[in-house]
Amino acid sequence: MQDSFDSINSNEGLCQPQSRRPAHSPTGDCAYLKNLNETQSEAVQTIDGPLLVLAGAGTGKTRVLTTRLAHILMQDRAKPWQLLAVTFTNKAAREMKDRVSILLNAPVEGWWVGTFHSIGARILRAHAEAIGLTSSFSILDQDDQIRLVKQYMDIHEIDSKRFPPRTIVGTIQRWKDRGLTPDKVSPNEGADMAEGRILNLYMDYQDRLKQVNAVDFGDLLLLCLDLFKSYPDILEKYQHQFRYILVDEYQDTNVAQYLWLRILAQGHRNICCVGDDDQSIYSWRGAEVGNILRFEQDFSGAQIVRLERNYRSTPQILAAASGLISQNESRLGKTLWTDAGEGEKVHVRGVWDGEEEARAVGDEIESHQARGHMLSQMAVLVRAGFQTREFEERLIRLGIPYRVIGGPRFYERQEIRDTIAYLRVIQQPDDDLAFERIVNLPKRGIGNTTLQVLHGLARAERISLSRAVLKLIETDEIRPTARKTLSDLLLDFNRWRSLLNDIPHPELTKTVLDESGYMAMWKTANTPEAPGRLDNLRELCVALEDFDSLAAFLEHVSLVMEYEDSLIEDKVNIMTLHGAKGLEFLTVFLPGWEEGLFPHQRALDDSGTDGLEEERRLAYVGLTRARERVFVSFAANRRVFGRWQSAIPSRFIDELPYENVDIESTPRIYNRQVGSLGGLSDVGVGDNQNKWRYQSHNRREAPIIKDADWRSEIIADKDDLKIGTRVFHQKFGYGRIMAADSGKLEIEFEKAGSKKVMRSFVEEA
């Protein structure tokens, strides 16, 4: 290890070490510093004491981080194993290692570079015995956590349907992110969870983890904090070892991460945090923007270096983004600038409705493609996942390849595929793949044993699963509760089929989602993704309105699912604004800038002013993803979950500096005023608005198959076993046939008594 480090210092052409160089002293002979601008160089060379680097979007923060690491090593201020560099992703950690090695022209071994969780695990494994574990402890994934919590809910007789175990796990993890062990959680916080016994579950859960020599991800820092508090000598060891601490994306740290960093930095106090308070957009993950805002108070004598020179976007885009984010009060403040050419103003377009918005975006993409622009350098960034559908549909119609980053395409999402499976069974009762997908979704108590019997009968008699159910429920092959459940499910499907003639198919879909319990399943999930799944389900009902019949919709979905262009690399990118952070594109489309959608009403309702400021930071992130051009759009009317609503343009549009935007709007959609975009009172109240309200479509009716029809279509082979024949059944044992009718036998079993079974399940004894 020492030889490797010595070889770094011997490389010619690199800056030679200067022992105890004063902070931020000129080092003109250092080749790796020559490509830095003045403030970047200041951030790299300000070595001693706490430092906050406020790195605006596109200002070269990664270059600063990696060059700072190399500089500390080259100045011989620390050995590699005395450096602690913390990132949020393994990818970022690998990139940091690779870049430093390139700068130094030699591999660096023995240093501590990784994510919070990986560094925490490394420390815990070295001192596992001190916290009652062994060094080989397991790290549970979410499925294991849910299963363990479910076990204790059963012990405490807590209704897991009313309080889903996944929700309990999520609450426990949020407490851990805040650095709260069970004894530190206020009883009031858990009063409405798990019948008021969630703290008992938390304690039982933690005890069980220790018994089985396991931790979860939240424990990796929480137990470290406990270790440092209980064993001051261990804490002192790491405080002394880590001469320099570097932290990336500091604005995204939660409370536990903040406490962990702060206690380790109390040794040498050489902590450098790099982040951007204007890009803190993950409060729903536990991120605390206050961590970066309080840096000067938390670390006395701290210096702040602002990286404001942007190497990504044009002056027009930067001015628009800076004007917008300046409306936030909770920020440290900086102004991005660039010496690049002026570029295009931010295009703001008002359209009549969402369909016109998707059409306009598609036309713009086609136009840029025709001028030789790469599709992969274009991105559609939406506030909510359900918005992607209209853009996907439009791009498919235009034959433009696209990719959805950070998630599946709209019709490939779990909740959409589940709902479509229900609709497929309504349309085609013999669709086995669809029936199998939803027969126990939501949970109905149909276990693997019942499904195995069902599949066995379907194979033996060469019939569909639905038809096998119809036969099976008249026998004793499965438990009475399972028979009742399957019988009720068939009745539901028959009733839904009958409704095809009576109500529009979008309304039918809502009925199915409600009566099946599928919508309720997601309403009670209380997981971070649940609200988005509910939005997607509502958007699916909107999509159905564009088709004359259920059959036409299902055919369309089949064609969309077949749309495959995996061999094409050049594709338009579609993703959420949250997923776009850290990325950049030549051209960015920002649709749906309307009140209630962006800023999102849920954020305003849940968090008030703090929620609004985070939504504004999200808008800032969206604008600063663009290098050359941005298209912001809003619709005067939007079909929100099946109902037409007049939409008010987002307040963020009014906050864009007038001189940096170019407004294009359908007449009477947006009133342009000098000095302000304004005109919100003139939005979406045209004379023809009524024609956009929902109208029932003429439908091509699908044939209805009722129970009686099914029975008549089932062809019964002539019984080949006579009354009185002795037979054997795998479940019930030996018995004699007492009666036979259309493939169903009544058998008096020697031990099980009289049972009705299927002919295909018995053998002559």
Image (tube, rainbow, N blue to C red):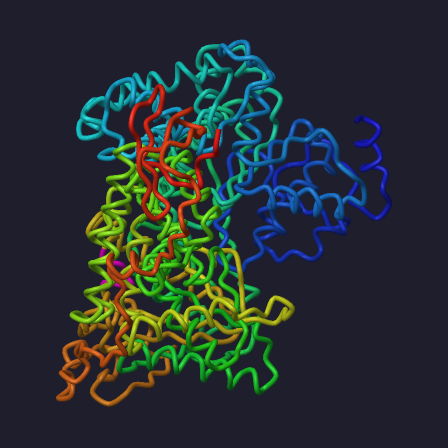
- The picture places residue 530, in percent across and down from the top left corner, at 31, 48
Q: Quadrant of residue 430?
A: bottom left
Chief secondary structure of the magenta span?
loop
496 vs 395: above or below: above
Count of numbered circles on the image: 0
Is 374 or 609 nearer to us in this picture? 374
- The picture places residue 615, in percent across and down from the top left corner, at 32, 57
Q: Is residue 599 highlighted in magenta?
A: yes
Q: Position of 430 compared to 85: left or right?
A: left
Tell me if I can see residue 300 in this picture: no
Q: Is residue 145 highlighted in magenta?
A: no
Q: Quadrant of residue 750?
A: top left
Is 191 or 29 nearer to us in this picture? 191
Span highlighted in magenta in the image: 596-601
95 vs 258: above or below: below
Is 77 or 256 nearer to us in this picture? 256
**Image point 53% across, 64% down: which residue?**
584
- The picture places residue 107, in percent across and down from the top left corner, at 78, 39
**Image point 44% across, 17% down: which residue?**
226
* Quarter the N terminus occupies: top right
Q: Position of 324 compared to 240: left or right?
A: left
**Image point 52% across, 72% down: which residue?**
378
- The picture places residue 197, in percent across and down from the top left corner, at 22, 21
**Image point 60% across, 32% down: which residue?**
84
159 vs 430: above or below: above
